[in-house]
Amino acid sequence: MTQFLQQIINGLSIGSVYALMAVGYSLVYSIMNFSNFAHGGIIMLGAYFGFYLLTLFKWPFVLAFFGAALCSTVLAVLLERVAYKPLRMRNAPFLYFIISAMGASMFIENFVIATIGPTFKTYPPVLSREPFQIGSLFIGRLDTMIFITSAVCLLLLVYFIDFTKVGKAIRATAFNARVSALMGINTDMIITLVFAVGGFLAGVAGVLFGMKYTVYPQIGAVTIKSFIAAVFGGLGSLPGAVIGSVILGLLETLISGYFSSQFRDLISFSLLIAILVFRPVGLMGKLGEEKA
Amino acid sequence: MDWFYVKGILILSGINLMAVLGLSLLTGFTGLFSFGHAGFMAIGAYAAAFIGVNLRLPLIVSLLAGGLAAGIISLFIGRLTLKLKGDYFCIATLGFGEAIRLILDNVQVFGGARGWPGIPIRIDLWNVVLINLAGIAFMISLVNSRHGRNMIAIREEELAAETIGIDTFKYKMISLFTSAVYAGIAGGLVGYYTGFLQPKMFGMTKSTELTIIVIFGGIGSISGSVLGTLLLTALPELLRAFALWRLVAYGAAVIFIMISRPEGLMGGKEITFKGILRAFGFGHKHGKAREV
Amino acid sequence: MDILEISDLTKTFGGLTAVEDVSFRVQEGSISGLIGPNGAGKTTIFNLITGIYKVTAGEITWRGDPIQNLEPHVIANMGITRTFQNIRLFKRLSVYSNIITACHGNASYSIADSVLKSKRFRTEEKRLREDAVSLMKILGLTEWQDHVAHSLPYGLQRRLEIARALAVKPKLLLLDEPAAGMNPDETQQLMHHICRIRDEFGCTVLVIEHRMDLIMGICENIVVLNFGKKLTEGPPKEIQSNPQVIEAYLGKEAGISA
């Protein structure tokens, strides 16, 4: 029983990182209706930023954390300006956006490989190795931190989206961009803002991921899992992305804990197939019909 | 530069071209975006190698069998994803490509991650050229028939295509199947050229490269795909010294193409005899249009 | 005889009822109109007939057979086709390509036939080419045949959409605001074309329009919708002087003149 609970905690921890990744991705999807495949690159860069701020510049931890998240924010906005805005201005078909995203993703990943190099980097230990103990359960401090940080970020996001004026503007634009523009909402700014928020979350996710595992240029590939989690939860639905990610994290940990870790990566794909077969719109998705 | 070296580049181009032609039909002519076509190559490669080595069947049969294997798998994927919105197909192909690689990595029958060496080398320039000529001829005939036109209609305006009686699901499946068969044959060629197979030869990088060639050559142009493949296979070989930066340049180039000339090299037009004459000043200005 | 019958057709989107209990019939060989203020549900009805939307309740009967909820391409192959309110041409293709693509149903050669260039392929392709050329001629598009669709003047784009729809050899043609954006001259030409379509192609026509000159000019029967419900139906003279119709469009104090 203890082992089971232990695995649950582990699963929640990784699930919460996936949640941060998936939410950032889903946010952009809900506004612009396309999959930002370069999101993974931003996450990866967040991990690197955090690493270098900690080791090279020797910033204190909390500062480095925020610094990394801010750098990611800036980069995400830059990405939007360079790779997507010109297409938006020309009303390009959504295919072009995906292609551009793919190019950006390739550029970012290989730039890091070419400059910094492909070797893994490890975060210096920031927290004490001693786990918390509740009864016979050992909860790692890192896992706790990850979970709490993710939870706080997501709660702040919920507050931002659901309870602020700007958040309402975002929801309006996600619902219908053209009408929102007619109502006086500066859609350009909203899109920039959404990318910024997505970038911030990506940066946080990157640092957390880097701390839990290691830092390497292909971290972006992990985000495929968060895409799948977002699809599982319902593309465009933020709560769906969170739920999907947590479930994915739990499934992965439990299955690799009780069966074999070889199958861990296959979980996400099996989940994807299951979703596509049984409920393509995802857990929280809604069926829509195209208007003629 | 000796003939042997040039021959190698030509053979590699020929192998890539089969996969690119297939992807061009799917993405360039039908408008469906696949991020995992290397997965079909992998299936074709291993199937063709298995049939040729263990059943000792002639090359052509093995290649066709490899292609068919990939095609059959594509039907399953198509059944699950083609009735859904565009993004689902993208993510599904992404997941599929990775899943295939993972499965091959873990299944020891085919050598797992270490690979399958010792495949008899049966590919030389002449049979690659023949296969390519056949492939190109088939593609040209397909595209210039009512079946090809239907696929193009789906790319242009899917809803309108439905209302003029085109069974879009059926044609998307045909397009996907054909593209998978082409990719499978290409995969088979890989094994019989290099003499060994490794799952990582068919990863995301390969899938992405194929897509980039299709875009670079120009969506909706067979001659564009041919030219694009030649250029983008030869160039990196010649620039081997800059290997690391090759993909960085690729990524940047993709973004650049999308922003400035999304129609790619050929702009959706084909090189035709009449076109060449016209370029030199012969022939009328208004013949029957040959654009696709 | 009634070629199309709509019975108690209802369509809801979540909480919104776009169409409610609408019933009417279309006579074979007629030119009928479907009018009503914006948002009355006219295009929704077209979408329901052509299978783009699924019906919430009610029936659509085509030549005696129920067709509601069939796939759009099946319905198209049964003989019903349409144009769109916001033109959905194959924008990057030429005029000729737009039309010959739509001719596909008039050939039956397989992919194998195309690759082997069999006799069947060659004769059928030739026939498709001839069909496309003659359609362009009838609708006056021949000199534009190589022009890319989106480069055409607006009025011609609309005409091209009609040509493309006719390539399917429909028995019922649904036109969604075909005169939108046209000047009186172009509208006259359009009216002439629509009558020709009915006379020479033996095609029944149902038109959604706001342009009363066109509706009153060529329609034999007019169905009026308002807020998703059928208000009334009848020949032009009756509709013109119907106070409820006038009120629906213009409020209580105005009158419509033809």
Image (cartoon, helix red, strand yellow):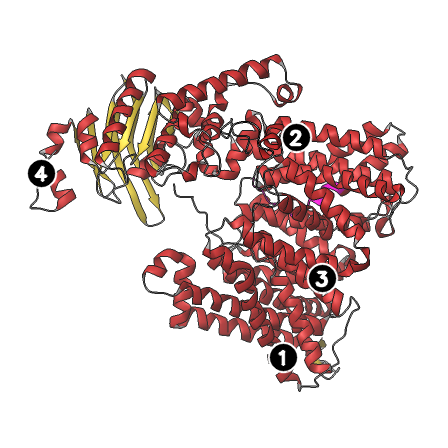
Q: Residue at x 78, y 56 (%)?
A: A262
Q: Residues within 10 Å of mark 1 (few under 14, many from 20)?
A: many
Compute the Cα span from label 1 to label 3.
24 Å
In the picture, the quarter occupied by the C terminus of chain B is top right
| Quadrant of residue B78 within the rendered picture | top right
**Residue for badge 3:** A110
CA gap between label 4 and label 1 equals 71 Å
* Cα distance between the residues tagged 3 and 4: 72 Å
Q: Which residue is mark 4?
A: C243
Q: Are marks 1 and 2 on the same chain?
A: no
Displayed quadrant of residue A24: bottom right
- Mark closer to the chain start, 1 or 3: 1
Q: Nearer the viewer, mark 1 or mark 2?
A: 2
Q: Nearer the viewer, mark 3 or mark 4?
A: 3
Tell me the SS state at disc 1: helix
Q: Identify which residue, B9 or C161, lies in the foreground.
A: B9
Which residue has dot 2 on it? B139
Residue B60 lies in the magenta-colored region:
no
User: Pointer 4 indicates a residue of which chain?
Assistant: C
Which residue type does callout 3 highlight?
A: Asn
What is the spatial separation of the Cα atoms under label 4 and label 2, in whole angstroms?
Answer: 62 Å
**Marked residue chain, label 1:** A
